Amino acid sequence: MSMARLKITQTKSYIGSKQNHRDTLRTLGLKKLGDVVVKEDRPEFRGMAQAVRHLVTVEEVD
């Protein structure tokens, strides 16, 4: 059985955001506007995406 995956795309700039939001984006692997990363669907990644939900979009992919 394959694990579900999350496609996380940075849709807004981090300029003017709190430092911990910038750090969360960096931890997810997002460096600039338009970057896309695919991560395993795990609570850790969902939580990080939830923390910066105003800067990213999240899609589930198989």
Image: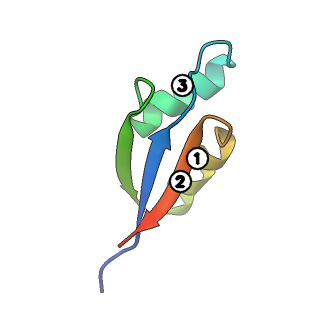
Mark 3, residue position: 23
- Looking at the rendered structure, the secondary structure element under dot 1 is helix
> Dot 1: few (<14), some (14–19), or many (≥20) neighbours within 10 Å?
many
Please tell me which residue is depicted at 63% across the width and 17% down the height of the picture. 19
Mark 2, residue position: 58
Q: Is residue 43 left or right of residue 30?
A: right
Please tell me which residue is depicted at 40% across the width and 72% down the height of the picture. 4
User: In x, y percent, where is residue 13?
Assistant: 56, 22
Please tell me which residue is depicted at 38% across the width and 34% down the height of the picture. 35
User: In x, y percent, where is residue 45?
Assistant: 51, 52
Q: Which circle, 3 or 2, is nearer the viewer?
A: 2
Is residue 41 in sight in this rendering? no
Q: Is residue 48 left or right of residue 60?
A: right
For marks 3 and 2, the one nearer the N-term is 3
Q: Are marks 2 and 1 in contact (CB under 8 Å)?
A: yes
For this orientation, the residue located farthest to the left is: 1
- Looking at the rendered structure, the secondary structure element under dot 2 is strand
Quarter of the image holding residue 36? Answer: top left
Question: In the rendered structure, which amino acid carries the disc numbered 2?
Answer: Val
Mark 1, residue position: 49
Q: State the CA–CA distance, disc 2 to disc 1.
A: 7 Å
Q: Is residue 3 left or right of residue 19?
A: left
Q: State the CA–CA distance, disc 3 to disc 1.
A: 12 Å
Q: Which circle, 2 or 1, is nearer the viewer?
A: 2
